[in-house]
Image: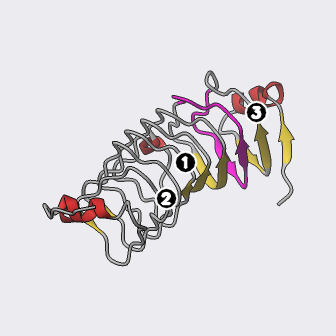
């Protein structure tokens, strides 16, 4: 897809408009920590090397949006409007909250996702390939057909998550067995 590259200076007036709709833009190396994205609509956009740490996502729409190598730490993704379509590659998603969010088929690949909360989320067919997940909660989440190959430092209790046909790789998959109280010798 061909994106229109936009600068911070060009973005500010667009966001100040009532119900901003931004389509086909490439937001590259922007610091958006002070930006107000409230109510914005992002269609077919890409964020590359941007800093969005702790930015409120109140009532925004994300459709076919890619976050690549971005700092999106501490964001409450519950505030994003439902039925979105967004993906992450190489991002820092530490301390993020995705509680009970429908994330079917989403990609969280090669990301740092430490101390995040996916409790009650629908993550069926989601991909966490090669991501670091230490301290992240998946309690009562649907992980059916999810892909955790190459993911590290996760703890998923099979008693409190749906795991049918999920994919895991060795040696990290041993954590699933240990969660059941089974002793594993290395």
Looking at the image, which residue sits at the far left? 181
- Region in magenta: 36-55
Q: Are marks 1 and 2 in contact (CB under 8 Å)?
A: yes
Q: Between marks 2 and 3, how big is the CA–CA gap?
A: 24 Å
Task: Where is residue 155? Give x, y as percent.
Answer: 30, 53
Quick one: label 2 or label 3, which is nearer the N terminus?
3
Asked whether 93 or 153 is in front, the reply is: 153
**Residue named by callout 2:** 128
The residue depicted at 31 percent of the width and 54 percent of the height is 138
Residue 111 - label: 1
SS label for mark 2: loop
Label 1 crowd (10 A; few <14 / some 14-19 / many >=20): many
Verify whether residue 41 appears in magenta: yes
In the depicted structure, whether residue 100 falls above or below residue 29: below
* Of labels 2 and 3, the one closer to you: 2
Q: Is residue 65 left or right of residue 96?
A: right
Q: Is residue 15 magenta?
A: no
Q: Main secondary structure of the magenta part?
A: loop
Identify which residue, 157 or 38, lies in the foreground. Answer: 157
| Residue 64 in the image, given as x and y percentages of width and height | 66, 58
Q: Is residue 38 left or right of residue 3?
A: left
Q: Which residue is disc 3 drawn over?
A: 29
Q: Position of residue 116 (x, y in %)?
A: 39, 42
């Amino acid at each position: 897809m061909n994106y229109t590259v936009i600068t911070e200076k060009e973005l500010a007036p667009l966001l100040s408009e009532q119900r901003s709709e931004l389509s086909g833009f490439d937001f590259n190396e922007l610091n958006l920590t002070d930006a107000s994205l409230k109510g914005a609509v992002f269609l077919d956009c890409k964020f590359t090397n941007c800093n969005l740490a702790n930015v409120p996502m109140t009532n925004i729409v994300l459709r076919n949006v890619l976050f690549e190598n971005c700092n999106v730490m501490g964001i409450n993704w519950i505030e994003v409007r439902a039925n979105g379509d967004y993906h992450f590659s190489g991002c820092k998603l530490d301390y993020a909250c995705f509680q009970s969010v429908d994330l079917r088929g989403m990609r969280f690949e090669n990301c740092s996702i430490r101390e995040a909360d996916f409790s009650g989320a629908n993550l069926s067919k989601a991909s966490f390939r090669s991501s670091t997940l230490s301290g992240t909660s998946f309690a009562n989440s649907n992980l059916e057909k999810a892909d955790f190959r190459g993911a590290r430092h996760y703890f998923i209790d099979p008693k409190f998550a749906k795991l049918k046909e999920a994919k895991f790789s060795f040696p990290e998959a041993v954590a699933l067995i240990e969660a059941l109280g089974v002793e594993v010798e290395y």
